[in-house]
Image: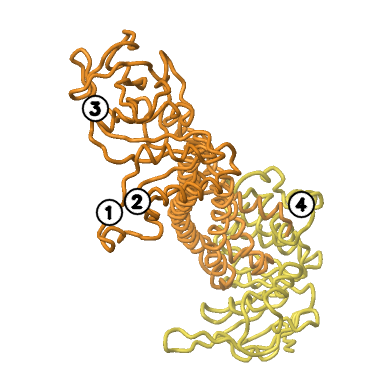
């Protein structure tokens, strides 16, 4: 599904040029459970942003489902993000003035789905995640674990091919963190690819394929299947 | 994205910050209200003046001594002569022109009227019996000046309603003798309350025969002659005949200025319309200021909502959609501001009409529409920059922050 070849990403910090990614090549088949680990500054978040089309590589080719998405215009990339990718963040990034249900509904609203079709999908997902009774609460009335469930429901509402999670447990205690990981693993079992960025080996170690990054390069890859 | 959803989303983000939203709406609405109120004032002044002329009748010709139209300000200087006086005989000569219904010589001087120890400074109008019909006066008591030979200095007077109240109180004025300077005038009538007519408060005047005024105050010339024609169509022809007649009487010199109601009211109309436009323009500057305020606040909002914009991008909002959402916010703000401002403005001009009942202060429809349109346009124009900034936000960077 995901194929990256010779990806480079540089940032200039003042006079200095930081190479966040150097000649990275990677392939992730559909439905795989991958964790990306490494010390901070190793380029793992940059990697996830490029996979999620939130960032563009300076050079290299990125293909998603056979399309060279790294060459797409902004508008086309928005469509790819909307239809194929779901994001889960460390800080949840729920919109505070909207209820849980409205937050989950937002990708459908942006996609122009008719209101009548939106409601059942939203309530179905919330029920599936055990959040039906909290649907009309605003984020500040929810616990951290509940917020992350809402965020995962939002990531799933467009039925994406992959969920990209950036430190999804970073802001949760161990127990709720584990619950969130279990939830993601359930989704993976239903066929959604999970790409999980974490610095926690206990969490990253659960993935069927583990990638370690150091200094913008892949140091080790348990999948070993470099494109 | 559906339009209803765009509206709802923008409305939700506006109502999440009620104080900020209220301030922006207030700024816009004050601008719109200012345009509406000020143009209604200007328009009220215009209609007031126009009504005055219409009240006078549209088939009126007025003759002033001195010629300004062709000789300009140098007439006397260059020729070494000042203009010839306009006399009662001049006025009488105009009666023979076909199509002329009334000829009214007019003098206005200020005098002091006294009765039983009470005194009052008044404008004294020297004229003939015809003035009653030219000015459309109605009498409260007694009669207007009788039909006399205009050269006959009879010391009679007709008084305005304020003069009557102040000098006579409740006592009947007709038949009483009042003093003006060394002369005594017999009151023959009192005019019903009338108000202003072309800047002269009719309720304040004392009207006397023109020859009496000229004799007492030693006036060589008339202030003006008012000529009323039979029909409006006669005005042009009568005007040129008046000029010819007076040129013959004044040794071939065209030393009078003849104006028609038409020309005067058109001029006033143009002046007051320009005034209305000017005050409206000044008021619309405040709309521009409101627009800059909206831009300022929205720029702050963009940086406050950086992570929200980043999130919207991550879940699939295109740059166009982000721009649209910010546009919609500005459009809602300025539309609400425009509506509130229009209501405030109408209310403001209602208050003006209550305070000055004689001023028909109605905002012209074009001004209300223009104010509303300017409010919307400024709102959207000034949201261009914030919306563009939001759309160009780097999502990876925006999401890295909390």
| Real-space CA distance between mark 4 and mark 1, rounded to the nearest whole angstrom | 104 Å
Q: Secondary structure at mark 4?
A: helix
Q: Chain of mark 1?
A: B
State if disc 1 and disc 4 touch (CB < 8 Å): no
User: Residue B265: percent from the left, percent from the top?
Assistant: 49, 45
For disc 2, the neighbor class at 10 Å (few under 14, some 14 to 19, many from 20) is many
Decide if residue A189 is in sight here: yes
Q: Chain of mark 4?
A: A
Q: Secondary structure at mark 1?
A: loop
Q: Which residue is mark 3?
A: B121
In this image, A65 relative to B149: left or right?
A: right
Q: Earlier in the sequence, mark 2 or mark 1?
A: 2
Q: Which residue is mark 2?
A: B66
User: Which residue is at 27% across, 16% downward?
Assistant: B167
User: Residue B31: percent from the left, percent from the top?
Assistant: 47, 49
| Real-space CA distance between mark 3 and mark 4, rounded to the nearest whole angstrom | 95 Å
Q: Which residue is mark 1?
A: B82
| Real-space CA distance between mark 2 and mark 1, rounded to the nearest whole angstrom | 8 Å
| Real-space CA distance between mark 1 and mark 3, rounded to the nearest whole angstrom | 31 Å
In depth, the one of B147 and B264 nearer the eye is: B147
Q: Which residue is mark 4?
A: A128
In this image, B260 relative to B111: left or right?
A: right
Camera-side mark, 3 or 2: 2
């Amino acid at each position: 599904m995901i194929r990256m070849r010779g990806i480079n990403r540089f940032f200039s910090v003042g006079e200095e040029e930081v190479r966040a990614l150097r000649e990275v090549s990677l392939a992730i088949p559909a439905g795989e459970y991958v964790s990306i680990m490494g010390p901070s500054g190793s380029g793992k978040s940059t990697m996830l942003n490029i996979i999620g089309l939130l960032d563009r590589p300076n050079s290299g080719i990125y293909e998603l489902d056979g399309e060279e998405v790294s060459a797409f215009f902004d508008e086309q990339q928005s469509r790819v993000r909307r239809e194929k990718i779901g994001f889960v963040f460390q800080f949840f990034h729920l919109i505070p003035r909207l209820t849980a249900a409205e937050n989950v509904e937002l990708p459908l609203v942006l996609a122009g789905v008719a209101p009548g079709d939106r409601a059942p999908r939203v309530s179905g997902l919330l029920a599936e995640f055990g959040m039906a009774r909290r649907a009309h609460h605003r984020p500040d009335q929810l616990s951290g674990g509940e917020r992350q469930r809402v965020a995962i429901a939002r990531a799933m509402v467009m039925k994406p091919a992959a969920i990209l999670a950036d430190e999804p447990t970073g802001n949760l205690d161990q127990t709720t963190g584990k619950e969130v990981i279990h939830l993601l693993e359930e989704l993976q079992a239903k066929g959604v690819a999970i790409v999980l960025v974490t610095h926690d080996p206990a969490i990253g170690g659960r993935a069927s394929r583990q990638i370690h990054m150091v200094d913008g390069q892949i140091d080790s890859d348990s999948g070993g299947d470099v494109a | 994205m559906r339009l209803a959803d765009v509206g709802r989303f923008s409305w939700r983000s506006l109502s999440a910050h009620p104080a900020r939203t209220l301030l922006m709406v207030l700024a816009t609405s004050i601008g719109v209200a200012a345009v509406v109120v000020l143009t209604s004032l200007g328009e009220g002044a215009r209609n007031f003046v126009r009504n005055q002329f219409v009240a006078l009748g549209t088939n009126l010709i007025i003759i002033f001594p001195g010629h300004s139209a062709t000789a300009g300000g140098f007439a006397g200087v260059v020729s070494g002569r000042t203009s010839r006086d306009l006399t009662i005989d001049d006025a009488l000569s105009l009666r023979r022109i076909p199509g002329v219904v009334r000829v009214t010589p007019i003098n206005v001087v200020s005098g002091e009227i006294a009765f039983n120890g009470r005194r009052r400074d008044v404008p004294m109008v020297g004229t003939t019996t015809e003035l009653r019909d030219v000015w459309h006066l109605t009498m409260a008591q007694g009669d207007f000046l009788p039909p006399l030979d205009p050269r006959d200095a009879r010391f009679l007077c007709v008084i305005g309603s304020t003069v009557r109240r102040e000098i006579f109180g409740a006592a009947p004025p007709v038949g009483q003798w009042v003093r003006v300077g060394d002369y005594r005038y017999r009151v023959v009538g009192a005019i019903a309350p009338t108000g202003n007519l072309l800047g002269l408060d009719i309720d304040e005047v004392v009207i006397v025969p023109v020859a009496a005024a000229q004799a007492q105050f030693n006036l060589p010339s008339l202030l003006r002659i008012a000529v009323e024609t039979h029909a409006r169509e006669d005005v042009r022809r009568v005007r040129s005949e008046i000029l010819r007649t007076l040129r013959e009487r004044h040794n071939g010199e065209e030393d009078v200025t003849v104006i028609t109601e038409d020309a005067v009211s058109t001029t006033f109309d143009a002046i007051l319309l320009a005034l209305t436009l000017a005050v409206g323009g000044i008021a619309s500057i405040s709309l521009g200021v409101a627009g800059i305020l909206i831009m300022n606040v929205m720029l702050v909002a963009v940086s406050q909502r950086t992570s929200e914009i980043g999130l919207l991008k991550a879940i699939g909002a295109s740059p166009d959609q982000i721009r649209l959402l910010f546009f919609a916010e500005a459009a809602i703000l300025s539309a609400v501001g425009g509506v509130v401002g229009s209501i405030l403005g109408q209310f403001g001009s209602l208050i003006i009409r209550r305070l000055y009942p004689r001023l028909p202060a109605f905002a012209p429809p074009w001004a209300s529409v223009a104010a509303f349109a300017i409010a919307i346009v400024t709102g959207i124009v000034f949201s261009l920059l914030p919306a563009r900034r939001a759309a160009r936000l780097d999502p990876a960077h925006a999401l890295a922050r909390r």
